Image (spheres, rainbow, N blue to C red):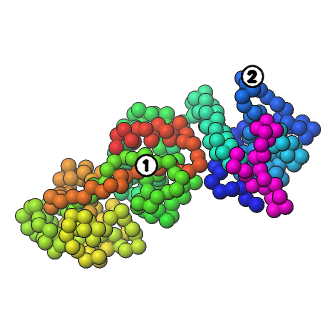
């Protein structure tokens, strides 16, 4: 039987197999403390919890199963309680086992990262952090900021992975990510980057060819409203924006011209119509005169733009540095 869902066990960073001798585990005191069990026992427990199997843990450790069973019995003796329930179907974590698995998994991940950090420092190895954002967020928000981050942290390389669909997103391959839509990511850590403010944008030439600025809502409703193709969900559609400002608009308002928000913004800049602009993505374009806001109305939602980190994994020092910098300079 699989280990109980919700137990987070990080990758094992400590080699414990060399501590086994004749089927038993050598005990090592941690700074002479009697307040903690052996680090090898905890590391072995993390592997057993991850596999929900003594035999699979023994195979990973390249030791006999009796050595693993002995290590777990010693750990349970130290705690004075069972960490696994055992029956004919297999093993599963007890309540105490789940608590320990969560703590040990995160702790071993932090130890692993600390070891890597020291090794990198000694060897002069550049640290790498990977962040995933939409194409538009990469081009209009992230890239203009990375030069500043690199100046403050020359020892860290940032790799950017772009995706325009949360459905195709793999949290296992990145350190940080900004979701495309508003879907919640259960268990993920997250930090608010900025408020979400949305308003219509178009080229000055297009705006002035329609009516003097600022436009009324009736004029906006009669303009060419650009949107993404239906299957490419954004954080807000025209019908939602109009409702938020107190105006009724058809649910299908807008012409789906592309599957890429960056292309939609270029279409607006070239005079093809009006698109919804997220402030953090269009403010630089407006400052350069490439886009204007034809109406005075804007919508600020109660859901900020979030920076997320995958669940069950401690941030590396490089990812922590990028997170702190982006939150401070958003």
Q: Quadrant of the N terminus?
A: bottom right
- Residue 91 among magenta residues: yes
Q: Nearer the viewer, residue 161 or 88?
A: 88
Can residue 74 be seen by looking at this rendering?
A: yes
Q: Residue at x 81, y 62 (%)?
A: 89
* Vertical arrangement, residue 95 with respect to residue 258, above or below: above
The C terminus - image quarter:
top left
Q: Is residue 136 left or right of residue 206?
A: right
Residue under circle 1?
Answer: 307
* SS under mark 1: strand
| Residue at point 43%, 53% (across, down) | 178
User: What segment is highlighted magenta in the picture?
Assistant: 75-96
* Residue tagged 2: 32
In primary-sequence order, the first of circles 1 and 2 is 2
Q: Position of residue 90 (x, y in %)?
A: 81, 58
Q: Secondary structure at mark 2?
A: loop
Crowding near the residue tagged with mark 1, few <14, some 14–19, many ≥20 C-alpha atoms within 10 Å:
many
Taking depth in this image into account, of 107 and 254 the one nearest to the observer is 107
């Amino acid at each position: 039987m699989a280990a109980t869902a919700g137990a987070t066990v990080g990758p094992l960073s400590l080699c414990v197999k060399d501590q086994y001798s004749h089927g038993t585990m050598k005990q090592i005191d941690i700074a002479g403390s009697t307040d903690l069990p052996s680090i090898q026992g905890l590391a072995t427990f993390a592997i057993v919890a991850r596999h929900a199997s003594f035999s699979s843990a023994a195979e990973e450790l390249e030791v006999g199963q009796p050595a693993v069973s002995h290590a777990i019995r010693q750990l349970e003796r130290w705690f004075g309680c069972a960490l696994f329930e055992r029956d004919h179907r297999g093993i599963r974590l007890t309540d105490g086992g789940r608590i320990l698995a969560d703590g040990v998994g995160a702790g071993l991940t932090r130890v692993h990262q600390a070891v890597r950090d020291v090794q990198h420092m000694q060897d002069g190895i550049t640290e790498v952090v990977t962040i995933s954002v939409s194409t538009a967020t990469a081009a209009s928000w992230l890239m203009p900021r990375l030069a500043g981050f690199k100046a403050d942290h020359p020892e860290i390389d940032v790799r950017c992975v772009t995706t325009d669909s949360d459905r195709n997103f793999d949290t296992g391959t990145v350190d940080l990510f900004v979701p495309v839509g508003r879907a919640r990511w259960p268990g993920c850590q997250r930090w608010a980057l900025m408020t979400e403010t949305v308003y219509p944008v178009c080229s000055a030439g297009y705006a002035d060819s329609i009516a003097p600025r600022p436009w009324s809502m009736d004029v906006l409703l009669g303009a060419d409203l650009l949107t993404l193709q239906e299957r490419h969900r954004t954080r807000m559609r025209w019908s939602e924006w109009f409702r938020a400002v107190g105006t009724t608009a058809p649910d299908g308002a807008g012409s789906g011209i592309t599957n890429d928000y960056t292309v939609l913004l270029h279409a607006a800049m070239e005079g093809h119509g009006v698109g919804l602009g997220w402030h953090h993505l269009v403010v630089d374009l407006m400052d350069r005169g490439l886009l204007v806001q034809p109406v005075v109305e804007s919508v600020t939602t109660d859901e900020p733009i979030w920076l997320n980190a995958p669940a069950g994994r401690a941030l590396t020092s490089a990812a922590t540095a990028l997170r702190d910098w982006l939150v401070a300079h958003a």
